[in-house]
Image: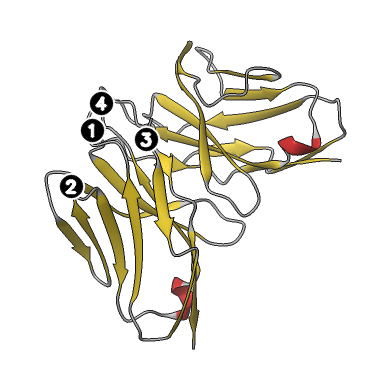
Amino acid sequence: NAGVMQNPRHLVRRRGQEARLRCSPMKGHSHVYWYRQLPEEGLKFMVYLQKENIIDESGMPKERFSAEFPKEGPSILRIQQVVRGDSAAYFCASSPLSLGANVLTFGAGSRLTVL
Amino acid sequence: GENVEQHPSTLSVQEGDSAVIKCTYSDSASNYFPWYKQELGKRPQLIIDIRSNVGEKKDQRIAVTLNKTAKHFSLHITETQPEDSAVYFCAASKEDTGFQKLVFGTGTRLLVSP
């Protein structure tokens, strides 16, 4: 079991460009979460997805950010027209479906730097 | 919504001493409280968790206590070692129909000096 896989690990973008971050959950996990960690801060919930469904996006900025988890392929967090304040580590986590076994396993993170 | 506060923000101890990190939460419906350890540049890793039907849980040198009435929980590390140096995050959530929306504290940077 390869664990939660995220790519790219590091991404550099100039202001105004788009950033796409990908996350493949652990085998057997059907829930994907995205968290953002600003430098020297804790993790902030952004969005929770199941296959083809956004369940809770209460932590997503209203503009420029979107997420999807298609039937086939990884979950994608997309940031359009990036600004310097988007520079952060973006962690994906997954959990299984079973109630009471919802331990989150985090990926290694994608570190976005906006120049 | 849930709000989690964590203290202290930094903690320096000598090797072999004990370390205690404390968190409080606001939502009385929260019932799952994990602790994560994050080394520099690495992913957060679960080290121990506790559910609200127990008051204490121990795993070797690590223990967590939960006081539901006061809405606070603590991480205790005994016989600290230099490799325990990391940032520790507490979190709280309401386990509910498979949705695990963790709210994290702001972290405690633990430094264990040899």
The reply, left or right, for residue B4 in relation to residue A68 is: left
Distance between the alpha carbons at the discs numbered 4 and 1: 10 Å
Query: Measured along the vertical axis of the image, is residue B3 above or below residue B101?
Result: below
Answer with mark 2 or mark 4, whichever residue precedes in sequence: 2
Q: Quadrant of residue B96?
A: top left
> Which residue has dot 4 on it?
B96
Query: Measured along the vertical axis of the image, is residue B14 above or below residue B40?
Result: below
Q: Are marks 4 and 3 in contact (CB under 8 Å)?
A: no
Residue located 52% across and 38% down the image: A44
Tell me the kind of residue under disc 2.
Answer: Lys
Distance between the alpha carbons at the discs numbered 2 and 3: 14 Å
Answer with mark 3 or mark 1, whichever residue precedes in sequence: 3
Distance between the alpha carbons at the discs numbered 2 and 4: 18 Å
Q: Are marks 1 and 2 in contact (CB under 8 Å)?
A: no
> Which residue has dot 1 on it?
B29
Instruction: Output the chain of dot 2.
Output: B
Tags 4 and 1 both on a single chain: yes
Helix, strand or loop at label 2? It is loop
Answer with mark 1 or mark 2, whichever residue precedes in sequence: 1
The reply, left or right, for residue B74 in relation to residue B9 is: left
Q: Nearer the viewer, mark 4 or mark 3?
A: 3
Distance between the alpha carbons at the discs numbered 1 and 2: 10 Å
Instruction: Output the chain of dot 4.
Output: B
> Which residue has dot 2 on it?
B68
Instruction: Output the chain of dot 3.
Output: B
Mark carried by residue B2: 3
Tags 2 and 3 both on a single chain: yes
